[in-house]
Image (cartoon, helix red, strand yellow):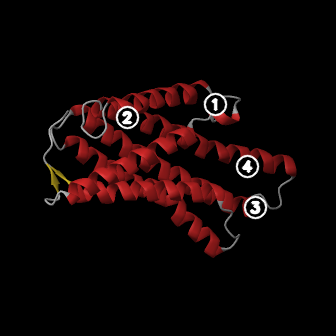
Amino acid sequence: MGNARLWYHGGIAGVLGICCYIMAILISWPDTQWGLSVSVIVASGFPILGIVASYAICDYIAAPRATAANRIALGFAISGFATLLAMLLVQVAVNSALPEITRGLDATAARALTRAMRMVDLGLDVAWDLLYSTAMIFWGFALRTRRGFGPGWAFPSMALGALLIVLNVATFPWPPGDHGSVDLGPVAALFILALNIRLAYLGWRALRSGSGRDTTAES
């Protein structure tokens, strides 16, 4: 048995997390303390809400039967989102402090320092990609027989996870999109968005059944 309220609200949390991801990319925040604080909240929303959504997905998959792949996927997902949070906060902190840090340096030294500090968040970015991509592969195995998802969700999850790992390793330490390769980040984000919308719908449907619990067996 699983908690349909958790699935519903967890799916919504996942959708809101993706919205935070889109806002963090598209919006240029004011160069003030207020703008910096808001950007930290928005950027942090994706990994924090992502952890909530990951737990809800794990609970949905485990409702009929607990599996090792599902538990392993949750562990990798939480580790990945925690690493992403660290990466985003390092990135925001470095970008906000660099003008002051490089003040007084000549142009060559300033560029070298900026490039060196940039490598820190690039390394964390790859770590996040590898961890969450591994979670996608294991969740693919777990979703194959789960009613409400099945192979149509499982195999794209495994394929995306595997491709993300290959591309990130092949172009390390540079992101694939900056190295003349394909950037699958937006595709993965859309897949995660669809997955969470589906989870929220399944939770809402289970709640409408009256019990607020789901007792369906695997298909």
Q: CA distance from mark 3 to mark 2?
A: 45 Å
Q: Earlier in the sequence, mark 1 or mark 2?
A: 2
Residue denoted by label 1: 182
Dot 1 falls on a residue whose secondary structure is loop
Picture quadrant of residue 132: top left
Residue denoted by label 2: 153
- Give the mark toward the camera: 4 or 2: 2
Please, what is the three-letter code of the amino acid marked with disc 1?
Answer: Val
Which numbered marker is on residue 114? 4
Q: CA distance from mark 4 to mark 3?
A: 10 Å
Please, what is the three-letter code of the amino acid marked with disc 4?
Answer: Thr
The C terminus is located in which quarter? Answer: top left
- Give the mark toward the camera: 3 or 1: 1
Picture quadrant of residue 208: bottom left
Residue 11: image location, x then y, percent: 35, 54
Residue denoted by label 3: 99
Which numbered marker is on residue 174? none
- Front residue of 177/206: it is 206
Residue 30: image location, x then y, percent: 69, 70
Crowding near the residue tagged with mark 1, few <14, some 14–19, many ≥20 C-alpha atoms within 10 Å: few
Q: Are marks 1 and 2 in contact (CB under 8 Å)?
A: no
